[in-house]
């Protein structure tokens, strides 16, 4: 399976039996892919790290610049590029800022190394330039997107009178079944390798 959004849309349309795009618009497919991708990211996030240079002194480390961050695993400070073993700083995250619980305050220009869980992307979806979905999750992601697309369509069908009696309920049931299969497959998948700083449970 190719890795860009076009390939995911094609696979999704095939599973939904809508290869001509008569029932689901491209925007609906993309919305469903985004929801399923978020689930994959929560279950099997990327292990990422970045350096943050503090413009001002103090114990607040801004996180907004981190690429696709979901949550922070560790903060290293004091830190110089490549320094090891790490100096682990206690912290808590509030409103996109890591607040360090250290006796000494970082100075302006100090480098803080942040290790964090990041979300996955699909090339061409929401402007992403690369696909990072684990290979073992690609088929599962399509199942999840099919489930979300079906549930959304069921809501639309329930508001219209042009569909056969019971069609919305059957669509909803099918979507729930796809989501159940998706979540079961996600539980079975384990990351091939993670950094020593990560404990996924």
Image (cartoon, helix red, strand yellow):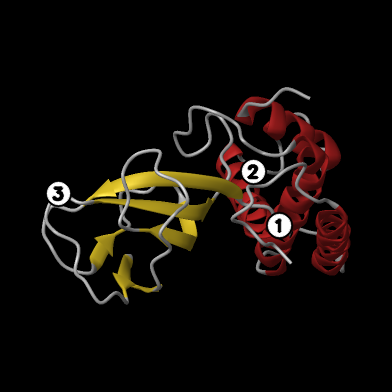
Q: Are marks 3 and 2 in contact (CB under 8 Å)?
A: no
Quadrant assignment for the C terminus: bottom right
Foreground mark, 3 or 2?
A: 3
Side (left or right) of 2 relative to 118: right
Mark positioned earlier in the residue sequence (1 or 2): 2
Disc 3 target residue = 109
Q: CA distance from mark 1 to mark 3?
A: 46 Å
From the viewer's perspective, is residue 89 above or below residue 189? below
Helix or strand or loop: what does disc 3 sit on? loop
Badge 2 crowding class, 10 Å Cα cut-off, few under 14, some 14 to 19, many 20 or more, is many
Quadrant assignment for the N terminus: top right
- Identity of the residue drawn at 73% across and 62% down: 151
- Identity of the residue drawn at 34% across and 45% down: 51
Q: Are marks 1 and 3 in contact (CB under 8 Å)?
A: no
> In terms of depth relative to the viewer, which is nearer, 184 or 65?
65
Disc 1 target residue = 148
- Percent position of residue 127, x then y: 44, 34
From the viewer's perspective, is residue 37 above or below residue 61? above
- Whether residue 95 is visible here, answered yes or no, is no
Q: CA distance from mark 3 to mark 2?
A: 45 Å
Mark positioned earlier in the residue sequence (1 or 3): 3
- Identity of the residue drawn at 59% across and 46% down: 46
Q: Quadrant of residue 154?
A: bottom right
Disc 2 target residue = 29
């Amino acid at each position: 399976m190719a890795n860009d959004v076009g390939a995911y849309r094609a696979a999704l349309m095939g599973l939904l039996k809508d290869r001509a795009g008569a029932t689901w618009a491209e925007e609906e497919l993309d919305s469903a892919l985004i929801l399923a991708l978020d689930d994959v990211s929560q279950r099997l996030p990327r292990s990422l790290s970045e350096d943050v240079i503090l413009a001002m002194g103090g114990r607040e480390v801004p996180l907004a610049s981190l690429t696709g961050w979901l949550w922070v695993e560790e903060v290293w400070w004091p830190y110089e590029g490549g320094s090891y073993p790490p100096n682990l700083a206690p912290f808590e995250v509030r409103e996109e800022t890591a607040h360090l619980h250290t006796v000494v305050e970082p100075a302006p220009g100090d480098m803080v190394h942040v290790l964090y869980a990041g979300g996955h992307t699909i090339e061409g979806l929401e402007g992403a330039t690369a696909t990072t979905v684990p290979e073992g999750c690609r088929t599962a992601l399509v199942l999840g997107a099919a489930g979300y697309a079906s549930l959304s369509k069921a809501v639309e069908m329930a508001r219209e009178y042009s569909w056969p009696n019971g069609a919305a309920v059957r669509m909803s049931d099918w979507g729930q079944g796809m989501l159940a299969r998706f979540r079961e497959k996600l539980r079975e998948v384990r990351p091939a390798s993670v950094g020593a700083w990560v404990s996924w449970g």
